[in-house]
Image (cartoon, rainbow, N blue to C red):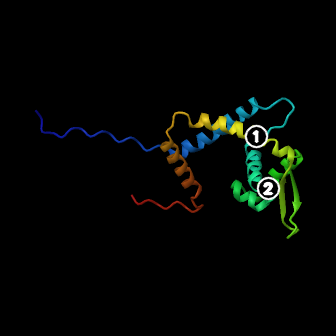
Amino acid sequence: MSNAPPPQPTPSPRPRLVFLLNSAQRRLQAWIGAQHAQHTHEGQASPSAAQAGALFVLARQDGATMGQLATELDLAPSAVSGLIQRLEALGWVQRRPCPEDARTQRVWLQSSGRAQLAPLRKALSRINEQLTAGFTEAELQTVARWLSHVQQLEAAPIPKVKP
């Protein structure tokens, strides 16, 4: 019999988080696009993911300012401007000057935009069911916590690691 200690298991390499996150984001967008196309009726406009996000924000905060929408959607103000222009062209929202400050635009959900909410909620529920299948609530909370952490990272240089 040998007095040598038992071999130690080789540690698993750390996950390639940046690669996995980027790859998952691309595939998720493609998958949601395919789901969207599959459930879009011929000749009827159906909201994109960004448009759906704006409609959901307005369902909670009708009359939100462009700045509030940018904050809620985590988008640049210029991106929100184009997004709202497209929603306005569809007749789903309407922009009007703020009564207190004419320089500020407020966005109001129109009845045709409000009609999009029920099908969107149904689609989102279906998508979330598929995304979360096979994971425990604790695992999902860990993923959500990590993604929230990533959202909070500052756009500062990464500190150098000493060898």
Q: Residue at x 86, y 68 (%)?
A: 103
- Residue at left 87%, top 44%? 90
The relative height of residue 162 versus residue 11 in the rendered view (above or below) is below
Q: Quadrant of residue 162?
A: bottom left
Amino acid type at mark 1: Ala
The x, y position of residue 106, in whole percent, is: 83, 60
Check the image and name the residue furthest to the bottom.
Answer: 100
Q: Which residue is mark 2?
A: 62
Q: Which residue is mark 1?
A: 118
Which quadrant of the view contains residue 101? bottom right
Q: Which quadrant is home to the C terminus? A: bottom left
Depicted 60 relative to depicted 23: above or below: below
Dots 2, 1 in contact, CB < 8 A: no
Which is more toward the observer, 3 or 116? 116
Task: Indicate the secondary structure of the residue bearing disc 1.
Answer: helix
Which of the two discs, 2 and 1, labels the residue nearer the N terminus? 2
The amino acid beneath tag 2 is Asp
Q: Mark number for residue 45?
A: none
Local crowd size for mark 1, using a 10 Å CA cut-off: few (<14), some (14–19), many (≥20): few
